[in-house]
Image (spheres, grey):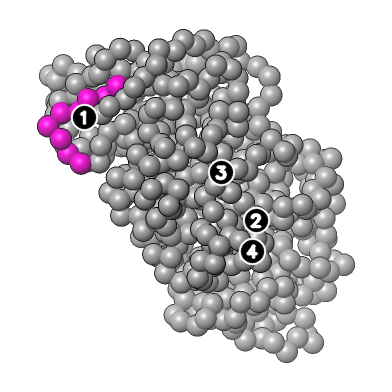
Amino acid sequence: MYKYILLIFSFSLVACGGSSGNSNSVPAQPSSAQISSQAVSSAAKQLALVPLPAQVVEQNGVLDLKTEVSLVADSSASTATQAITGLLNLVGINVVNSATTKIRLSIVNQPDLGNEGYRLVIADDISISAQTDAGLFYAVQTLKQLLPVAKQASYQLPRVEIIDIPQYAWRGSMVDVARHFFGIEYLKKHIERMAAFKLNKLHLHLSDDQGWRMEIKKYPKLTSVGGSTQAGGGPGGFYTQDELKDLVAFAAQHNIEIIPELDMPGHVQAAIASYNELACNNVTNLGLYIGLDVGFSALCLTKPEVIYPFVKDVLTEVASVFPSQYIHIGGDEIKHVLYPEFIDKANQIIKDLNRTMIGWEEASAGKNLAPDTLLQVWNDNYDIQSATDRNIHLILSPCSYFYLDHGNYNGQPETYTWCRRQGIPLERVYSFNPQKYSLVTGIEAPVWSEVVTSEAALDNRIWPRLAAVAEIAWTNQSARNYQEFTQRMKALKPYFDGAGIQYYAEPQLGW
Ligand code: ACM
């Protein structure tokens, strides 16, 4: 039995208009700021929902949901239909045409809901409407958090109207599968968990000094040699193109886009060990690398006749596997007079593939970047103005808030401290204010895996902190409050346990 104390609250939708935090290069959507400024009611805060929805309006009483419902779903709502079917199955509710309680999933023309917003009404029936399948899918994730994880004979759902819309179009998680390799089955679990918190971009860091993880058919040694080890030694691993296509399809079923990153022109020792000619002729360090240093390897920028055909071939295969609009070129931690030229050439190759480049912040050195390029900020105080002056938008990953390889607490073993000595506790993550930046497309939290050696450790670094990231990216800044977030997260513990997440038992959540 759910015991929600809901306060009566009235609201109104305001007309669509004004600016949002969204990028010009990601489909525009109204921001939750455009929904009534009274947006987040006390009612919303009583429900154990993360991320916090934009509006919750109580209607009196509960819906007593028995173990049968009928389901009426728009035929174009394939991911939402799959999600609701899975959810009903999980809680033991059968879909029976003659059942009196209906669940409706309707695609509607309501521009103020944007590309990902939804309206969820729990009354005598459950009515969900959105402009898109993705919006309906997110409503199902909300419904999932309102239901218990264990099967019951019946379920008491609060009668409520929720209108919800994300603040940012880019709500991401990055996993470094290069320093330590993590298999497809783990990534699928991660995708399911991300989706539950309405995250929508999974950035895979697919190559680095310690390993090359994506099969490239034209250069088989990239994986047979470059994929054969990892940081600290060990077997490494790689994904075949078929496995990656399957992962992309799985992610799409969860409204998550996979963003591939092949890091260049630095961070390439695994590629050099596979094809020595990619290094300059005077380079003698041509072997595999299992250490933890950065900034020592580079494609030979003075051998354009060697490296650009390689870059083009690799990115062409990347584009054939990943349908994402964006390809991440890396571009971090290298200083060379020809570096800006490399960025411009890589950008042109990606444009010729009808895709859009993302680079880490250093790629702002490119001279010919189009405004639809995205740059990912990782140093807290990096001067990115040369990019924003050109109307280039940002993915925010400042390391002292979002580098989840740093400790959940000061002194946590096997964590990094280079960006923030005291680690990055949950409260610190949550305290980030994206409004300090302009031209923000969204938020993304990376986990670098030099010292993350197992799936259990990866879970521990990601959760619960990624839920805070999700709320920063989804919920209007003015509506967020850490104490209330911790209360809602506390109540979601059974979800984390039920999903088998090996989270860090954060004391501030009472876990
Ligand atoms: C980075 O942390 N080198 C992007």
Total residue callouts: 4
User: Which amino acid type is marked by label 2?
Assistant: Cys
Q: Which residue is mark 4?
A: 421
Label 1 amino acid?
Met
Residue type for callout 3: Tyr
Dot 2 falls on a residue whose secondary structure is helix
Q: Indicate whether 175 appears above or below 76.
A: below
Q: Residue at x 46, y 72 (%)?
A: 453
Can residue 327 be seen from the camera position used here? no
Residue 430 — which label?
A: 3
The residue positioned 76% from the left and 57% from the top of the image is: 362
Splitting the image into 4 quarters, where does residue 32 fall? top right
In this rendered view, identify the residue nearer to me: 422 or 319.
Answer: 422
Q: Give the label, 2 or 1, closer to the camera.
A: 1
Q: Is residue 265 left or right of residue 148?
A: right
Q: Which mark is residue 1?
A: 1
User: Of label 3 and label 1, which has the lower sequence position?
Assistant: 1
If you read the primary sequence from the N terminus, does the residue marked by circle 2 or circle 3 appear first? 2
Question: Residue 217, position in %: x, y?
Answer: 52, 69
- Is residue 145 highlighted in magenta? no
Q: Which mark is residue 399?
A: 2
Residue found 60% across the figure and 11% down from its top: 15
**Which comes before the other along the chain, label 2 or label 1?**
1
Which quadrant of the rendered structure holds the N terminus? top left
Which span of residues is magenta-colored?
Answer: 150-158
